[in-house]
Structure formats: structure tokens, C-alpha cells
Amino acid sequence: MKQQLLTKVLAASAIALCGLTVASGPSYSRTSPRETGFWCSTSTGAPVTMYQNPQGAVEPWIEWTSDYFSASGYNPATRCQLVSQRLETYRRNRVLKYITAGQMNRQNVICTANQVNGLCQNLIYTLRPGQDAIGSLYNLLAWRQGQVGMPSAEESSKIPYIDVREKLGENTENEVQLPPFYPSSGFP
């Protein structure tokens, strides 16, 4: 009896450890086609941050082609994975409302804001030195193709604020303002 129990415990432990090992490696594909959220896809060549909305529509958000941060250990595939995870964390914590440009640690970044003209609160990714933050923001999102260079409908200052709540399938009526979310993740 004790031996059967020990065998079951060891088998369950082995299965759990295998699951942890698999889960800790990078994953560039969806675990389920019915899941809503962000992930990094490499199925078309260059890594792309993808989003699947609640209705099941899948669309590209960011294509990762720059090797600028590769010497620091952040090649396009790594950046895609990290940024996709950040965006998914922000979405799940309901702090992904507006995407804007700002500065963090004296570097230009693409970040989230709680409202139009709000502070740059959550890092999405770092821009390379000298890169035009506003121009990068306008050209950032793949789903904005055809609108490149066009001001955001929500722009009310020199810095654009792109409202992504509708793209996420979020209900924007009667929403509660949440405090900023500060993840503990890598920089670029």
C-alpha cells in the first residue's frame, strides 16, 4: 500500500516537474487557438507580437526587425517574447488603455498611460538612442497600417495617445481608474 502511494506521488511529481521544465522555455505559439491575449509568433519569419481578441480575430501588433539591442542580449525574438508577455500582463491587469511615447530612466520608450495626456506608466519597450519616439509610435502598431503618419483620434497634445481598449475588446463605459502597474521585468 505504501509502495503504491509512493509510486503515485513520484509519478505525479515527475509529471509536474516536466510541466515546469516545458513552461519555463520560450514559447512562440499559442497553447490554444481559443485563448484571448498577446503572444510572440515566428511563423512568418520575423518575430511578431500578435493579439487575439475575444471574438477570435488574430492581428499583428509589432513586428520585431531591429537588431540594435542584440549585443545586450535582446535580439528580436527575445524582445518579442518579453514585450508580448508585458502586454499580456498589462491587458490582464486592465492597465493597457493608451499607448504613448515617453521617457523612463532618461531613455525614450513606448509605454502605457491611464488617460490622454497621462503619465508614461508602464514600459512596453525601449527605443534606441536618437530614435524618434513620436514617429515610432505612429508607425508602431501593425494594425494601424494605412494610418501611418496619421494622428491618433485621441491625440490632444503633441504626444499621441493611441486608445487600444476597443482593439482589445474592452468595455470602455463605466470603467474604474486603476493605479499604475509596475512589473519587475527586464528593460528593453
Image (cartoon, rainbow, N blue to C red):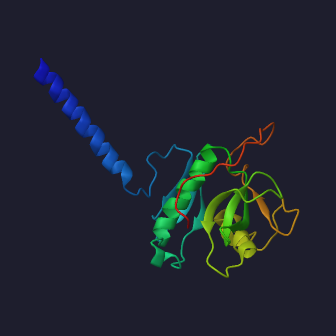
> Where does the N terminus fall, quadrant-wise?
top left
Where is residue 141? Give x, y as percent.
66, 65
| Residue in front for this viewpoint, 55 or 20 | 20
Q: Is residue 24 left or right of residue 145?
A: left
| Residue in front for this viewpoint, 39 or 179 | 179
| Residue in front for this viewpoint, 16 or 71 | 71
Q: Is any part of residue 96 visible from this angle?
A: yes
Where is residue 6? Give x, y as percent.
16, 26
Residue at 33% x, 45% y: name it: 20
- Label count reads 0
Residue 123 against residue 168 in the figure, above or below = below
Where is residue 85? Give x, y as percent.
53, 54
Q: Is any part of residue 53 visible from this angle?
A: no
Residue 46 against residue 18 in the figure, above or below = below
Residue at 71% x, 78% y: name it: 132
Judged from this view, the residue extending furthest toward the front is 105
